Image: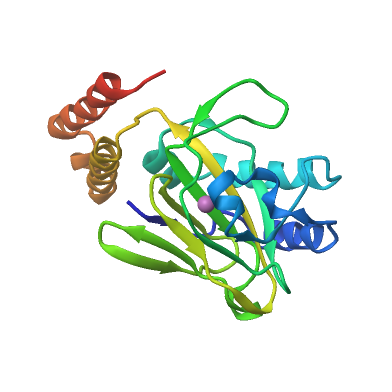
């Protein structure tokens, strides 16, 4: 499932993030690439030790923590610290690849299975040409280029690439997470059920507290209990 989360960041957060990224000293993007992806990766990445890193990460995590849609879709168990990249000039594309299945936060022995990948756009789409994130989904190739502050959530198992940026610069954050629910089909079912219950609750006060909605809510939690790995 591909899911857009609109307006994850406020306009102020976008502006602040952009200013921090524009002042950054970038490193070669190969620093976090696996062997196959290093051969097709031509971009720049913010080094772990960059002075802006902590504030930028807080900004992204704050946006995620306020999004009920994100939590419902991802059911995150463990979110790896967000990273940041820039596509511009000669470092302007990332060829077709799959993300590494297991990653560790920098300097840590902890291992996190990457169930879901996400890209959060900091540049406005009109500020650069190209740079679409192309995700090969079961429904065919999806081309994603979103307004600043929007996030796309997609399965880490999918093949994907970033098209060459031919004008301007594409600034973004990218991150991976392990979900409480490993199987995409089960996550999808829980998400649909959660959204349907939410819709019923919002319709009318008498529906919100009805015995049926309470039983559906119990079904949601009991499915999650059955499938969650904690
Ligand atoms: Ni990737």
In the rendered structure, the answer to whether residue 126 lies left or right of residue 134 reads right
In the image, taking residue 230 as reference, residue 175 lies left or right, namely right
The quadrant of the rendering that contains the C terminus is top left
- Image side of residue 82 versus residue 144, left or right: right
Provide residue 148's location: percent of width, then percent of height: 60, 66
Q: Where does the image place residue 139, in percent across and percent down from the top left? A: 25, 61
Residue at x-position 72% and y-position 72%: 90
Quarter of the image where one finds residue 224: top left
Of residues 39 and 27, the one nearer the viewer is 39
Residue 61 found in image quarter: top right
Q: Kindly tell me whether residue 5 is visible in this rendering.
A: no
Image point (49%, 45%), residue name: 99
What colour scheme does the image use?
rainbow
Count all numbered tags in the image, as a single digit.
0
Residue 104 can be seen in this image: yes
Q: Residue furthest left?
A: 212
Q: Is residue 126 above or below residue 90?
A: below
In this rendered view, identify the residue nearer to me: 163 or 145.
Answer: 163
Compare residues 226 and 62 and report the one nearer the observer.
226
**What x and y, as percent, mark residue 174?**
59, 50
Place of residue 20 in the rendered image (x, y in percent of width and height, measured from the top left): 80, 57
When the figure is inspected, residue 82 is found, relative to residue 85, above or below; the finding is above
């Amino acid at each position: 499932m591909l899911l857009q989360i609109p307006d994850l960041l406020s306009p102020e957060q976008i502006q602040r993030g952009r200013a921090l990224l524009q002042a950054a000293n970038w490193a070669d993007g190969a620093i976090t690439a696996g062997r196959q992806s290093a051969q097709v990766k031509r971009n720049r990445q913010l080094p772990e030790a960059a002075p802006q890193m902590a504030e930028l990460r807080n900004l992204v995590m704050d946006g995620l923590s306020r999004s009920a849609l994100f939590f419902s879709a991802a059911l995150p168990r463990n979110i790896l610290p967000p990273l940041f990249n820039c596509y511009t000039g000669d470092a302007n594309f990332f060829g077709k690849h799959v993300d590494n299945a297991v990653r560790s936060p920098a300097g840590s022995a902890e291992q996190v299975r990457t169930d879901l990948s996400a890209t959060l756009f900091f540049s406005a789409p009109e500020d650069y040409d190209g740079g679409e994130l192309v995700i090969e989904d079961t429904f065919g190739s999806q081309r994603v280029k979103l307004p600043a502050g929007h996030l796309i959530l997609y399965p880490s198992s999918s093949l994907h690439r970033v098209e060459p940026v031919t004008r301007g610069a594409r600034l973004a954050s990218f991150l991976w997470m392990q979900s409480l629910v490993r199987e995409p089909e089960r996550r999808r079912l829980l998400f649909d059920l959660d959204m349907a219950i939410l819709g019923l609750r919002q319709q009318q006060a008498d529906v919100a507290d009805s015995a049926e909605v309470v039983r559906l809510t119990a079904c949601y939690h009991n499915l999650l209990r059955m499938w969650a790995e904690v």
